[in-house]
Amino acid sequence: MKVGFIGLGNMGAPMARNLAAANIEVAGFDIARACPEAVAPASSAAEAASSRDVVLTMLPDGEALLAVASEIIPAMPPGSLLLDCSTVDIDSALKANEAAKAAGPRFMDAPVSGGVAGAAAGTLTFMAGGSKEDFAEVSPLFGIMGSKAVHCGGAGSGQAAKICNNMILGATMIVTCEAFALADKLGLSRERMFEVVSKSSGYSWSMNAYCPAPSVGPKSPADSDYEPGFAAELMLKDLRLAQQAAESSGADTPVGRLASKIYESFVENEGGAGRDFSAILLKFAKNG
Ligand code: NAD
């Protein structure tokens, strides 16, 4: 399988590197970054996409996806597949799907969970939206870059799964941090709170696997002064996408809406920019 890879940032570069290390022929392009070793540099997105079976994109947002899609779709061979692994709004994923279908190539949205560490280790989770046949066809690529891939349904459903997951993640991280701040006030040690909650009905990934309190639980960004990890800005982006989807579909998501507002204030006015999203503990408990 010949692969084109467009968007070689924090996530895209290690994903492309893993494909190349598995002997897949990869041509790469990024407007600002150099290609990782073993990826053949192309001089444009269109060049990276021409004569490829699959073109992967790993871009910042829906606007970038639509700009790249309009550039590469005319260069993609009929029957090839545009596999967008970025996190974007559902509307942009559907527009990219329509644009591809009208011109010949197929489209699948397959955003990921697992962060930069998961991209480097090849342990990402992919949530895919597209046809069953296309999912089966690109599954070997998911197997190289990740450890789990779920076919969620038709086009756009991968993005739907991603924003639902991250709305839960943002809200549980906030309430976990609130609970640590409350425990501080009540004189309950953070270690004992972790010991109890991580084995009780309040457990969650935020508490058990990514504990926001330094020196408590498994190693996490809290132990490295909240160096991301998963940056607070990216959490805000995903919470906003969830609210955008909730508004356009008429879903009632009051906690998700509040979580979005809390992260907005944290990133824009309270020093959260550039820090891991778990640093929101500092907003509630001054001694982090
Ligand atoms: P990033 O900003 O490091 O990388 C994006 C890359 O796209 C950049 O290198 C940029 O130069 C390139 N780019 C932008 N416009 C382009 C264009 N027109 N043509 C070619 N290249 C272009 O971002 P990232 O952290 O790698 O994230 C990529 C996507 O993955 C985002 O949608 C993000 O929400 C999602 N994501 C990120 C993480 C994470 O922990 N970083 C986790 C899960 C999902």
Image (cartoon, rainbow, N blue to C red):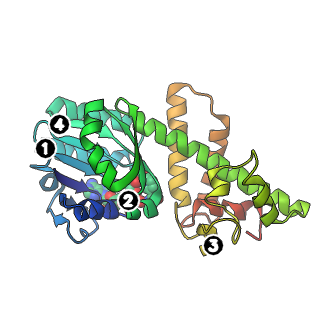
For residue 41, above or below residue 207: below
- Mark 2, secondary structure of its residue: loop
Lower sequence index among marks 3 and 1: 1
Lower sequence index among marks 2 and 3: 2
* Residue placed under numbered mark 3 in the picture: 223
Q: Quadrant of residue 23?
A: bottom left
Q: Residues within 10 Å of mark 4 (few under 14, many from 20)?
A: many
Q: Residues within 10 Å of mark 2 (few under 14, many from 20)?
A: many
* Residue placed under numbered mark 1 in the picture: 76
Kind of residue sitting beneath label 1:
Met
Lower sequence index among marks 4 and 1: 1
* Residue placed under numbered mark 2 in the picture: 122
On the image, the x and y values in percent for residue 142 come to: 32, 49
Residue at 79 percent of width and 55 percent of height: 196
Lower sequence index among marks 4 and 3: 4
Kind of residue sitting beneath label 4:
Pro
Q: CA distance from mark 4 to mark 1?
A: 7 Å
